[in-house]
Amino acid sequence: MKKIIVFFILLAIIPIGVHAEEYDDENAKLKYSINDTIWTEKPLSTERETIDRKWENSDCGVLMYGSSDFWGELSNEEKSGYSREAFNSNALDNSFLEMYQQVFTEMGYNITSSRLVDLGMQMMRYDGTATYNGTVFDYSVFVTLNNGYLAQWQYFGEADTICTSGVYTAVNSLESTISNSNSSSSLDFDYGNIIFSLILTIVAYMIYPFIRTKFMKVEYNEKTCKKMALWNSIIVGGIFLILTSALQENATWSAGPAFLYYWINRTLWIKKEKSINYTICESCGCKVLNKFKNCPKCGKKVNNEEIEK
């Protein structure tokens, strides 16, 4: 048992994560990360205005990222009253979505769906098929706006869950490096995410002991409660570890919450015995409440100190 606890403490101290390479787009004031165990960076075969980097996965396909100066293409009249920083993802709407859908269509993309999505930053997402050298590929394009630059992800390849999860992880890692760029909508998103995560963690770690004690009427003493709390944290923490590693390749998992809820559960669910708030009269055997000094039946003085077990 002691070895298990020591192992559990070490998990809480040592973070477990998957290596990811960090990138900065200084012009667009964006940063993102790529899991280099999934994607291998390759040089661009030809120089392109809107694409800066390319990665390949032999089982999936090609992932590309790039940005272009949208602000620089605006006329002075269109810029009037706005700053470069004001042109960020919050400005994207259906008019932008339709405009770039037309652009991709003219480039030969067959668009099957287009929509605005919130991935921490507002993005325009386009899915469909495209033909290259006579071969038809599935594709997904994500376009956002930051610091007056249009930034886009392009993925061409297999559309199965394993491949697209690697794409979504990269896209989700994109965030602005402008310190004052957090809009009210993004703050609401982060706040809601924190609250949801907190509620999920509380429910996950406490639902089992709650059901056992409140519905199944299982009673725990100090020893059995510690054992139940330990295994509950190990199992729930293990599930979170597996889910974090599988769904968020660039995320870091810590056993801190598991350790915390072990200490909470080990004492919270111990059966509390009722206190005795009366004394038995030694003369007649009558139960005398502690607030009385004399037995109401025989009148003899009794020891009225409250006894608690």
Image (cartoon, rainbow, N blue to C red):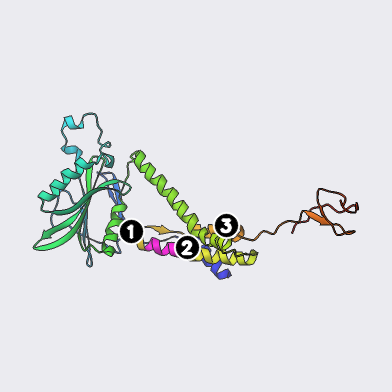
User: Is residue 79 shown above or below 224?
Assistant: above
SS class, disc 1? loop
Which is more toward the observer, 169 or 160?
160
Callout 1 environment at 10 Å: few (<14), some (14 to 19), or many (20+)?
some
Which is more toward the observer, 279 or 265?
279
Pair 1/2: label in front: 2
Q: CA distance from mark 3 to mark 1?
A: 34 Å
Q: CA distance from mark 2 to mark 3?
A: 15 Å
Residue 104 picture location, percent across and down: 14, 50
Which is more toward the observer, 105 or 168?
105
Callout 2 environment at 10 Å: few (<14), some (14 to 19), or many (20+)?
many
Residue type (three-letter) at the residue carrying disc 1: Ala
Q: CA distance from mark 1 to mark 2?
A: 23 Å
Which is more toward the observer, 47 or 273?
273
- Nearest to N terminus: mark 2 or mark 3: 2
Q: Which residue is mark 1?
A: 20
| 112 horizontally vs 6: left or right | left
Quarter holding the N terminus? bottom right
Residue 126: in magenta span = no
Residue 110, picture quadrant:
bottom left
At 31% from the left and 60% from the top, the residue drawn is 35
- Nearest to N terminus: mark 1 or mark 2: 1
Callout 3 environment at 10 Å: few (<14), some (14 to 19), or many (20+)?
some
Q: Which residue is mark 3?
A: 264
Residue 179 in view here:
no
At 69% from the left and 59% from the top, the residue drawn is 273
SS class, disc 3? helix
Residue type (three-letter) at the residue carrying disc 2: Gly
| 277 horizontally vs 259: left or right | right
Q: Which residue is mark 2?
A: 237
User: Is residue 213 shown above or below 106?
Assistant: below
